[in-house]
Amino acid sequence: MSSHPSPTTAASGGPRPATRASRVLVLNSGSSSVKYQLLDMRDSSRLAVGLVERIGEETSRLKHTPLTGGRTREQVGPIADHDAALKAVATELAADGLGLDSAELAAIGHRVVHGGQRFTEPTVVDDAVLAEIERLIPVAPLHNPANLTGIRTAMALRPDLPQVAVFDTAFHTTMPESAARYAIDVRTADEHRIRRYGFHGTSHAYVSRETARLLGKAPEDVNVIVLHLGNGASASAVRGGRCVDTSMGLTPLEGLVMGTRSGDVDPAVIFHLQRVGGMSTDEIDTLLNKRSGLIGLCGDNDMREIRRRVDEGDEQARLAFDIYIHRLKKYIGAYYAVLGRVDAVAFTAGVGENAAPVREAAVAGLEQLGLVVDGDLNAVRSGEPRLISPRDARVAVAVVPTDEELEIATQTYALVGESGGSGAGLGEGNA
């Protein structure tokens, strides 16, 4: 990945004139937090990054870093709600000459976790789009309400500016029905919108495309298995730039072993815990989403700590690591079969980018599939995309740092940058 030059100077070091609105503010609104980045899309450089957390508490915290010069600033104190949070962000940006009232701001791009089947592309938000995102709250109760709050607050601050929703699920809408459907009664599934949607889509889109670039090929010519391994984890099978399968399903609970989520379990486990264990639906939900995965297996969800314990001979940590790798290896094999031909396996996100033992163990024993890791290359720590397989390997193994904010900004700007915000809404082909 190329480094980001300063957006305030040209290559010669002199001032660079603005030709048209080129900035995009990316907002990722959680239930009690707002992450943000301001980017200049002329060179994809960052102008500022920041985080507001613990919104609604007395100990709210805003951390703001201008990347055009100046030091990180922090403030701690009550921030009542998302409206107050975004106003505080606007104040910090304005202090750096990057205010939301700038004529250089082309749009605000919002991460929206669940777009269902209707939203297959980035979409300029209007009332109909807001209503549809709200209608999807039952299948994303932890995420869509917060995403909506961020959008509505930003719209109130800049009602004249295009607000673009970029959906986590959109990249996976290309899955065939054979991959997206669960084998349950069709009418029941359709009535309740039960199907496999997939998540982390902006990451899978970005990483699959960057992997093709790393190989010197066009995305449409490459088949990639992407392994997004963070506290949340997901795998995808990408054929020629289009997702044909992914591990997460109706919710982000399905699939790989994660930091606190179980991933795949027999659905009858739920009935057993209700009937025999006397647990309520909410208790089981908490168990599978917050007290399972690595933390449920060994009490830690930080892979660095787990590996430290493994190296010290901790058997519980070893078992947790082995279960994590076993599930990961199963998905690699499954998606190899789905794709038929694999050009690369790409590791990304916090664990995928930084945990060399995970990468090594995930492909160990898969030499017959053409998957081999070079120990020396795998041990290198770098923030750049890189190959960690031998030069003559049949299948490339890559580490590709993800950049979801850049992907959101890129999709947002592609939609509104040239047209000044006249992109399609719900009724114009994007849903």
Image: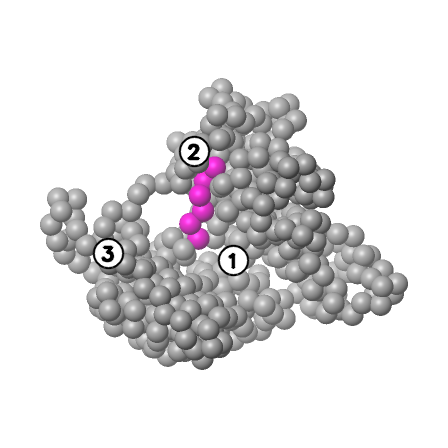
Residue occupying the point 60% across, 70% down: 141
Tag 3's secondary structure? loop
Residue occupying the point 75% across, 64% down: 284
Q: Which mark is residue 68?
A: 3
Tag 1's secondary structure? loop
Q: Quadrant of residue 118?
A: bottom right
**Residue 74: horizontal and vertical position, in percent?**
35, 66
Q: Amino acid at mark 2?
A: Arg
Q: Of 212 and 235, which appears nearest the observer?
A: 235
Q: Which mark is residue 168?
A: 1
**Residue 237: horizontal and vertical position, in percent?**
58, 42
Q: Which residues are magenta?
A: 399-404
**Residue 312: horizontal and vertical position, in percent?**
64, 37
Q: Which mark is residue 386?
A: 2
Q: What color scheme is it?
A: one colour
**In terms of sequence position, does the residue under pointer 1 or pointer 2 come before the other?**
1
**In terms of sequence position, does the residue under pointer 3 or pointer 2 come before the other?**
3
Q: Is 277 left or right of 307, judged from the image as shown?
A: right
